[in-house]
Image (spheres, rainbow, N blue to C red):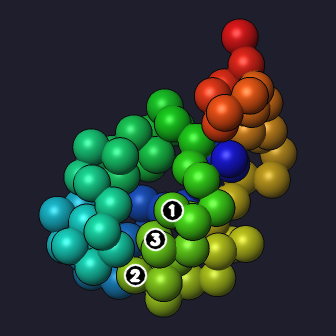
Amino acid sequence: MRYLRGLREAREKALLTQDELSAKSGVTVSTISRIENGLQAARISTIRKLAEAVAANPNDLIDWERPGPVMGGRGKAAA
């Protein structure tokens, strides 16, 4: 899981609202909002869906300076 930076900018450059991005990517509006506001990290599969929907390279959306949460067993974030 990784935090994203630049999703909002890429979405706006693609002239999409969060609702439209949701419809194109299959990612919920609430998830998009949390990711854009830095409140939630995204799974690689989600990053790919969002990047494809805004015609961006997934690597350009990832905040490489902010590490994602460490995952514990069964895909749950470790405490």
Q: CA distance from mark 2 to mark 3?
A: 5 Å
Left of 64 or right of it: where is 56?
left
Left of 47 or right of it: where is 29?
left
In the rendered image, residue 42, in percent from the top left (x then y), is placed at 56, 50
56 relative to 35, above or below: below
Q: Are marks 1 and 3 in contact (CB under 8 Å)?
A: yes
- Residue designated by label 1: 46
Q: Are marks 2 and 3 in contact (CB under 8 Å)?
A: yes
35 relative to 72, above or below: below
Q: Residues within 10 Å of mark 3 (few under 14, many from 20)?
A: many
Q: Secondary structure at mark 1?
A: helix
Amino acid under disc 3: Leu
Q: Secondary structure at mark 2?
A: helix
Q: Nearer the viewer, mark 1 or mark 3?
A: 1
Outermost residue, top direction?
79
* Residue at the image point whose x is 46% and y is 46% from the top: 35
Q: CA distance from mark 1 to mark 3?
A: 6 Å
Query: Which of the two residues, 11 or 52, is positioned nearer the viewer here?
Result: 52
* Residue at the image point whose x is 80% and y is 53% from the top: 64
Amino acid under disc 1: Thr
Q: Specify the label residue 53 is tagged with.
A: 2
* Residue at the image point whose x is 27% and y is 54% from the top: 28
Query: Which of the two residues, 15 or 74, is positioned nearer the viewer here?
Result: 74
Q: CA distance from mark 1 to mark 2?
A: 11 Å
- Residue designated by label 3: 50
